[in-house]
Amino acid sequence: SINGQLWNMSLYSRCGLLLERAKERRADMTSEKRQGVRDAFNKYHHEVTKPKRAREGKPLRNAGAGSPKASAAMDWEVNKICQEMCNEGDDDLAFDLYWGVAGAPSIDPKERTFGCRDALFAAMALLLVTAYALNLGLAIVDGEGPTIGDIAMFYEIGGCWGYFQDGMESVVTDLLSSRYLPKTPHFFDGGRTYNFRTPLADNRAGELGGFFSQLGAWLAKGGSILGFWGGGDGKFIDAHHHSNATVLNLLLVMRFILGLELNGAVPVGHPLYLCRDGISLSTDLIGRVFCPKLAQSENFKPHFGDYDAVVTRIFVCGVLAARQRALKNPSRKLIWKGKELDVVALRAAWESSKYSDYKTKRRNKRRRT
């Protein structure tokens, strides 16, 4: 600092030393000033940035912005081809290609040579594929908010429900949110403080009960599955949902079906092991690849409960449908733009750039440990 003022100093070969007045550090601001800076940024974002992106036909939020792995995987050729197919309305072909390239093994753990062989998840996978074949009901919920220990402090819950083989026009969606509330500090045992929005269970308990009552009434038709895509959603369902529906962690079950390990890793021996950087089952990636034409709005976009639930449904049902078609016609050729797609060639070794955010953060983490 010079006379109490912070300066940024840059050295250039042509113009020499350049001094610029530095912005005040957030750590040095009062809490009122920090809040003012946040409010000014949010106002500009909502009044200028979002309307501009809407006029240009761009998503209101960059899908994949919250997942470096998803952004890196988007450069894999298979994901790009599948995205192009979905943009042109060939969704079934996109899932057929994805399933063919994945080379998923049997769901019978005794016949597997790679991937998870857990008998419990084999039973869940069998239940899921059977439910699809019988066109039973599928409800999916997705929540937003922190999970602290065994308690999910969700400030938003969204869901969609309909029969497995129904089109999206027959699917019901719902959203209950306190996203508009500011984050406030909450104190826990051990002196820890967490900042998060007021949970639905605290400020909208009646409406939350109504949400799950509506969901329970639909599930009560019998033979339905209630699913969620990993995270703390299972804990939230356990705390607030009390029907007799079968509850599945669809993320883990789909990893099993695709021949991955339960932690998402591509095991040695898997056909996609040499291009494992392209494999990601985050809603960020599958939304970009398989749902590029899904219309977005102010309350229906990536990282909102209803949007992520719909994206999950599209992916799960799309993969199950592709599996069923492959079993009925294993020798089917995949024709795209007048040419037959070579599934084996698309499995060629590929890895994301070493300069991608995903790999940079992974390297930095290794250095710290």
Image: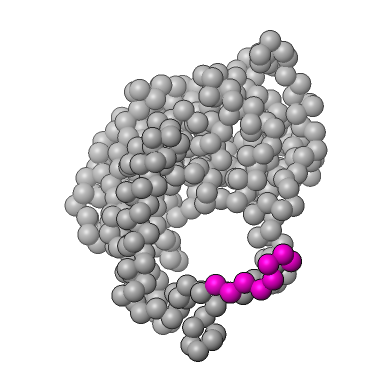
Q: What residue appears at the point 58 percent right and 29 percent down from the top-left corner?
A: 83
Left or right, 260 with reference to 141: right
Whether residue 11 is in magenta: the answer is no
Q: Main secondary structure of the magenta part?
A: strand
Q: Give the quarter of the image for residue 255.
A: top right
| Residue 194 appears in the rendering | yes
As displayed, is residue 284 above or below residue 364? above
As displayed, is residue 97 above or below residue 220? above
Q: Which residues are magenta?
A: 13-20
As displayed, is residue 256 above or below residue 152? above
Q: Position of residue 303 (x, y in %)?
A: 43, 47
Q: What residue appears at the point 72 percent right and 13 percent down from the top-left corner?
A: 339
Q: How is the image coloured?
A: one colour
Whether residue 19 is in magenta: the answer is yes
Q: Give the quarter of the image for residue 210.
A: top left
- Number of numbered discs present? 0
Q: Position of residue 257 (x, y in %)?
A: 62, 35
Q: Position of residue 108 (x, y in %)?
A: 66, 34
Q: What residue appears at the point 58 percent right and 74 percent down from the top-left corner?
A: 19
Q: Residue furthest bottom?
A: 3
Residue closer to the observer: 332 or 303: 303
Residue closer to the observer: 216 or 84: 84
Q: Position of residue 8 (x, y in %)?
A: 57, 74
As displayed, is residue 192 above or below residue 264? below
User: Quadrant location of the N terminus?
Assistant: bottom right
| Residue 331 appears in the rendering | no
Q: What residue appears at the point 32 percent right and 49 percent down from the top-left corner?
A: 47
